Image (cartoon, rainbow, N blue to C red):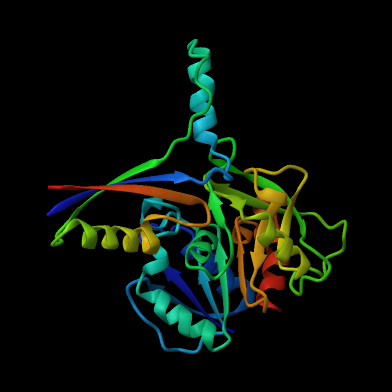
Amino acid sequence: MFIARINVTLKESVLDPQGSTVQGTLHELGESSVQDVRVGKYIEVKLDSPDIASAQKIVDRICEKLLVNHVIETYRSEIIPA
Amino acid sequence: MRVAVVTFPGSNCDNDIVSVLKNFYSAQVDKIWHKDQFSVKYDLVILPGGFSYGDYLRSGAMAAFSPVMQSVKEHVGRGGKLFGICNGFQILAEAGYLPGALIRNRNLKYVCRTVGLKKGSDSNRISGKLPDDRILRVPVAHGDGCYFASSEVRKQLKEEGRILFLYSGGNPNGSLDDIAGICSSDFKVTGMMPHPERAMNEVTGEMDGKVVLDLILGI
């Protein structure tokens, strides 16, 4: 059994109004060192798979099919034994 | 005219469009539950507004994989017309019938008000007949209505006359190029964020939804 930790973020070319708003508030709090904020989604999936390589294939497949809209989003994933 | 209106879990404008189709167009209308399939040859299938699957993951993402979408695919394959309003437009984009995506409104606010709409281009076979200065007043109600597509896709939409409507006198959601609705290259699949079915009543003072639907329904 594996757990896939999937982070979905908007592509760099897509304006992220949530990130901009959070950044604005951080600046108001005096955190002027914050240069940019991007807000994304974290999806955790438990997988019954014989090994990491096949788990990675499943993760890529489900991201392609449903979890990620490739018009606007990109993702990175990490797979760990459950 | 025979029309199917699909109800997804979370659709909330299905009965509105059904009542408009019956009262203003004397259409024969069937409501189809999203888990069902249909084999009837409808002239038009409508995906109504609402919040299918609670807008979880992304607006329209899960609905794009509802069982009924197989029948919708066959309907389009037969040359049938397909129209998505608001959440229906989001579903059509997620399902790949229309290019681009509807993302969070730029100001992050849910916007619910009447906006101005003008035709997308003269060569649009649906809205192109409208006079240049005709501004239609139609309500919007959405949180994820900002149309996004790459500059190449938007260029192609413009060149092919596929921009159905543009916002006029203010862009409510930050849509790129003020795009409010687009259509497929054969003009049979249409999608728009504003709700024409909500501007059909003299009591509310907004009747331009009839103009929009006349164009899209081809009457």
Residue B153 pos. (x, y %)? 66, 61
Residue B159 pos. (x, y %)? 77, 67
Question: Quadrant of the rendered structure where residue A57 is?
Answer: bottom left
User: In the image, is A72 to the left or to the right of B135?
Assistant: left
Name the foreground residue: B174 vs B193. Answer: B174
Q: Is residue B73 above or below residue A64?
A: below
Report the quarter where the N terminus of chain B lies: bottom right
Q: Residue at x 51, y 24 (%)?
A: A23
Question: Quadrant of the rendered structure where residue B43 is?
Answer: bottom right
User: In the image, is B30 to the left or to the right of A48?
Assistant: right
Q: Could you tell me how many numbered marks the image carries? A: 0
Residue B101 pos. (x, y %)? 55, 56
Q: Residue at x 38, y 68 (%)?
A: B65
**Residue B62 appears in the rendering:** no
Name the foreground residue: B195 vs A70. Answer: A70
Question: Quadrant of the rendered structure where residue B26 is?
Answer: bottom right
User: In the image, is B211 to the left or to the right of A33?
Assistant: right
**Residue B51 appears in the rendering:** yes
Q: Residue at x 84, y 58 (%)?
A: B134
Residue A65 pos. (x, y %)? 38, 64
Q: Farthest top residue?
A: A30
Report the quarter where the C terminus of chain B lies: bottom right
